[in-house]
Amino acid sequence: MRRRGEGPAEGPLVLTEAVRGAQRLAAVGREALRLGLAPGLTLADARARVPNLLVLDHDPSADSALLARMAEDAQRWTPLVALDPPHGLMLDVTGCAHLFGGEAAMRERVLQRLRRGGFSARGSLAGTPEAARALARFGRVAVVPPGQEAEAVRPLPLAALALSEETTLALKRAGFRRIGDLADRPSAPLTSRFGPELVTRLRRLSGRDSLRITPERLLPPCSAERAFAEPVSRSETIARALRALIDQVCAQLGGRGEGGRAFEASFDRTDGVVRRIGAEAGRPLRDPEAIERLFRERLDALADPLDPGFGFDRIALAVPVSESLDSVQPTLDGRAVTENEVADLVDRLIARFGPARISRFVPVDTHDPVRAARLVPAASPVVADAGWPVPEPGEPPGRPLHLFEPPEPVEAVAEVPDGPPIRFRWRRALHDVVRAEGPERILPEWWRERPMPARDYYRVEDARGARFWLFREGRYGGGEPPRWYLHGLFA
């Protein structure tokens, strides 16, 4: 719980919430706890015992937001951080403790940082998350040696099992008081009398089973970070540090034969606030200059500028999304081949205006011309599609560049039934057809809710050289005469 102005001048602090129409204590400060107040007590009873209470409303959403901020700050110790509501954090420090002088020294540094932020905190290190949680809340062991979880949790009360109130009460009535009392009993009778959850939790507390934590943020395939002995706030220093991290992740990507599609820079302030700036690319990138340019564009476009406050004490760069990228073939003079200018422009636009505002077309495997392409964000990963149709050498394209949606009706005259039109009127202009190719029959996609009717398409050219894509809907000799439509224009 965070300490905020407790003392005789204001009175002991308590937080209240409405429970069944009555105000009850949801949390109490250290001074209130010393005076005998506890969560669950009604506010009226609490005032009767301690008249000068400082009463504030309990705000669970604010507590959750604060816990999330603390989880972001805790990623300076390990990338695997999980929330343990309502007021706990779980850190998987496997392979990280040696970077901070060992497990005991790392635990002390974590707790010291929380205390400097005004928090009262406890912590323990153990081989399983359940054992660490139980020892932090109910025990006094700071670091459990490997394999000794079962011995460390024996003195803990039954509340450390985090079972339901009914099961805990039944265990107490059966004469059990400590974890050690249950550990000495065979599991079969305990399961048959109290249920399998009791034995499962007991095995996890004793280190025989382990349930891995689910971190708030997935571990990126490539990342780099820089910690500063003294906080930095100069923009030049921050830019140099970010460029050094970009060089490191590019070297990692090169070793993996990949390029980054998304990059995320994290700026950790000394007050615990973490600012994350993301940049996305329209193609896999491994060029440090191009990535640095993306971040410059992104930082310049921020509505809320990057504020270092009293300084950043850590900057990290992660690559959450990457794709395969072949090595760039150098030219004879030793310089790399210049990147495509259009792709560079797309990346800069994405960085400045956001990935949702820049789109590109991708082909769709369908014979319906309306659904043959769809728009996706330009920074979305490339997937294996049907591919754009490529005309035969010397042949005109099979589909026009411009489609009308919906197709525009025209008045057409055919020389023979079911033949190509010899003349049509579109937008009050008469066009005489000099060349025609077709028909190309496109059938409906029958599995759709409202499939289009069968159509006979023609590519036609008028006397002025303009080329059109017409189709006939219906057949001559039926109940109604066929109707003609203009669906697209060729370049």
Image: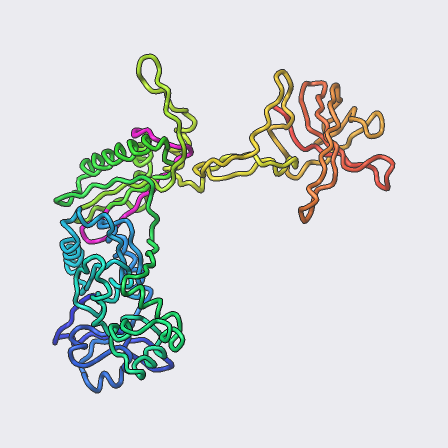
Is 280 in front, or is 402?
A: 280
- Tell me if residue 275 is in the magenta stretch: yes
Which corner quadrant of the image does residue 440 belong to? top right
Name which quarter of the figure residue 380 lies in: top left
Q: Main secondary structure of the magenta part?
A: strand
Q: Is residue 56 visible?
A: no
Residue 349 at what x, y percent from top left?
40, 34
Position of residue 201 measured from the top left corner of the image (x, y, whole percent): 33, 67
Q: Quadrant of the C terminus?
A: top right
In the image, residue 267 lies in the stretch drawn in magenta: no
The residue at the point 72 percent across, 18 percent down is: 463
Q: Is residue 3 left or right of residue 450?
A: left
Q: Quadrant of residue 374?
A: top right
Residue placed farthest to the top in the image? 332
Residue range (magenta): 268-289
How many discs appear? 0
Residue found 45% across the figure and 40% down from its top? 357
Is 426 placed left or right of 177 in the picture?
right
Depth check: give the residue in front, 476 or 101: 101
The reply, left or right, for residue 269 in relation to residue 341 is left
Q: Residue at x 13, y 73 (%)?
A: 7
- On the rendered image, what quadrant is the N terminus found in? bottom left
Residue 477 in sight: yes
The residue closer to the viewer here, 95 or 228, is 95
Residue lying at 19% horizontally and 53% vertically, measured from the top left: 271
Q: Using the image, determine if residue 255 lies above or below residue 309.
A: above
Left/right placement of residue 369 relative to residue 482 reads left
- Establish if 94 lies above or below 297: below
**Which one is in front, 40 or 397?**
40
